[in-house]
Amino acid sequence: MADRISVGDANRCMKCGFCMSKCPVYRTDYMESHVARSRNILIREVAEGKRPPDAEYQEALSWCLLCKRCETVCPARVPSTDINLAARTALAEKGGLSLVQKIIHHLILKHRSALARILGLSVILPGTRLLDRGGKPLRHLADLALVLAGKVAFPKFTASFLANRLPHRTQPAPGTTQRGRLAFFPGCNYEFFFTGVGLDVVSALSRSGFEVIYPEGQTCCGLAVFNTGDQDTARRMAETNLKVLSSFDHVITGCASCGTALKAYKEWFDEGHPLSGQARQFSETVQDFSEFMARQDLGGLTAPEGFSTVTYHDPCHLRGHQGVSEAPRKILGAVQGMNFVEMDMAEKCCGQGGSFGIKHPEASLALLAQKMESVKRTGAQAIVTSCPGCTLQLMDGAKRHGLSVEIMHISRLFKNRTIPPAGDENK
């Protein structure tokens, strides 16, 4: 990606200001330095040596949610999100990452499960500040540098991780005709925190007639590491996953962020890299759970008990980065006995944005408040989504705003499904 998008692309910005109409952060605080137009100017000036890459510059880069909404209205088609990432990478290469970040990134790369187990034990230790309830919940293991700084809490680890609860191979459910074989990539959150979601995803795939393989040796998708600018470590994570997953025709993930990373592997390796071709082929096999299931038979879906009305929140990493928005709505519309009500601004960021919600809590909570008002107007008993970061943020929002609403992964809608009849092979 470094050869495809560079800070020099910031010169394409016409300074028209159209991005101001779509940037969630700017629409909250109206700070010029928090919108793509201003950041592109700063990035260009630093690239030209007209100003130093000082703390003020680094702060400006951190105010981007990476949601890509600005790009939907840009007449010059400026890839502002990737320009920001290229600028972060340039900073990281010049020593912008802290020693703690570097250590944690390499620990995740080499010892992800062991690191998670150590953290799981730390949750029960008395007096630990990892349990600071005033912090924002952890979204990625890569944010552990912020945990150690006492700025973030994380949800309780499950007693048994997904790898211990899920067999290596799950056969198609009895009564179905096998429609194919695929691999499941859960990501950190569904592996260590929300293991029930991982089980629901695999169950739904199995009940649709698929043999599901949970390959050993998977590691973090690398997205959070990549977004800090540490692209070398992120690529090494990608290399590990390519070795484990490249032999499958279909790789399904229920995490919008992981899907964005896996699909982007083709851009993480520049032309001429030995893994460039393999990464390109692999990325084409990756599909989000909703994207894949919307192409299957959706008969027999019934509403979860107690949820007659639901609404849907579009994760930025699913809609903005992957262009997937119709598939989840097709699934929601197929559920019998359930009313799907579209919330206004469903595609607007909830305010989590990875480490954005940790670094800029006031802005994050302001965006969250707007989202909760949209939810209130629907009268829904549940918010359906497919991003663990969004799930944590929305759970926090429901609690803060006194909303009696459950946040559920879209795979939950398949839990009561009757076995579909044998049909055509997977397309």
Image: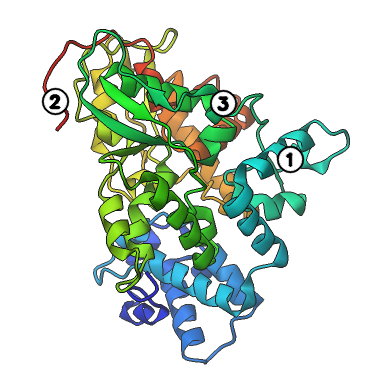
Identity, as a three-letter code, of the amino acid under mark 3: Asn
Res. 118 in view: yes
Identity, as a three-letter code, of the amino acid under mark 1: Ile
**Label 1 belongs to which residue?**
118
Query: Closer to the camera: disc 3 or disc 1?
Result: 3
Indicate whether 195 appears above or below 305. below
Neighbour tally class for label 3: few under 14, some 14-19, many 20 plus, Cα within 10 Å: few
Q: Which mark is residue 164?
A: 3
Secondary structure under badge 3? helix
Q: CA distance from mark 1 to mark 2?
A: 44 Å
- Residue nearer the viewer, 215 or 99: 215
x and y percentages locating residue 73 in the rendered image: 28, 61
Mark 3 or 2, nearer chain start = 3
Count of number-bearing discs: 3
- Residue nearer the viewer, 19 or 354: 354
Res. 29 in view: no
**Label 2 belongs to which residue?**
425
Indicate whether 336 appears above or below 131. above
Secondary structure under badge 1? helix
x and y percentages locating residue 119 in the rendered image: 72, 40
The quadrant in which the N terminus is found is bottom left
Residue at 54% x, 40% y: name it: 188
Residue at 51% x, 67% y: name it: 232
Mark 1 or 2, nearer chain start = 1
